[in-house]
Amino acid sequence: MLNDITSHLFNEFYYVCLNIIMDTSLHSFLDSKNYTRTKLKLIKTNHFEVKATINSVKGLFILDTGASNSCVGFESVSFFNLVVTDSSIKAAGAGATDMPTKISKKNTIKIGRYKIDKMNLVLFDLTHVNTALINHGGRPVNGIIGADVLKKGKAIIDYETKYLYLKKELH
């Protein structure tokens, strides 16, 4: 019995040490490749929340690799100082289809120390998204960080340690 307990404790200790080494190694390696690291929060819906700044205003977003474009809800237009124009594109996703959209061009987005200038954002009604989040014990978000930002930043998501890595552009 003592050998089983000792073996189990050793395995747990080994696993914790290995995770620390892997996290440190991944972080060090990506840092040497000019990546920034931003903490993610896993919420009850199994989405990651991420804090981001749009046009110097902090907001809360869902990270969604399946969303083609980064989006902001109509209700956040004045909050983020967005200049909006009409769009003929209809949005679909998360159980809703043919949703009217607008577009906002030339925005600045910051996620941690990662920054994108002249970024376009799609605007649409996020009521269905926020209702679902609230119904599952979450909190409402200002928008969605989508594949456009993730692709531009050559994103790496570390699901184990809950970090988002984005590669800084060299100017």
Image (cartoon, rainbow, N blue to C red):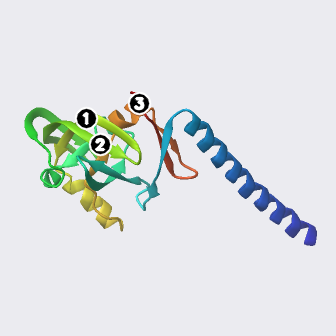
Q: Do the residues labelled 1 and 3 touch (CB within 8 Å)?
A: no
Please tell me whether mark 3 sits on a helix, a strand or a loop. loop
Please tell me whether mark 1 sits on a helix, a strand or a loop. strand
Asked if residue 119 is positioned above or below residue 77 in the image, the reply reads above
Residue lying furthest bottom in this view? Answer: 1
Q: Is residue 29 left or right of residue 101?
A: right
Residue type at mark 3 is: Glu
At a point 56% along the width and 39% down the height, the residue shown is 31
Quadrant housing the C terminus: top left
Q: Which disc number belongs to residue 155?
A: none
Asked if residue 111 is positioned above or below residue 90 in the image, the reply reads below
Quadrant housing the N terminus: bottom right
Q: Where is residue 28 in the image (x, y as percent from the top left)?
A: 62, 41
- Crowd rating for badge 3 (residues with CA inside 10 Å; few <14, some 14–19, many 20+): few
Please tell me whether mark 2 sits on a helix, a strand or a loop. strand
Q: Name the residue under label 3.
A: 169
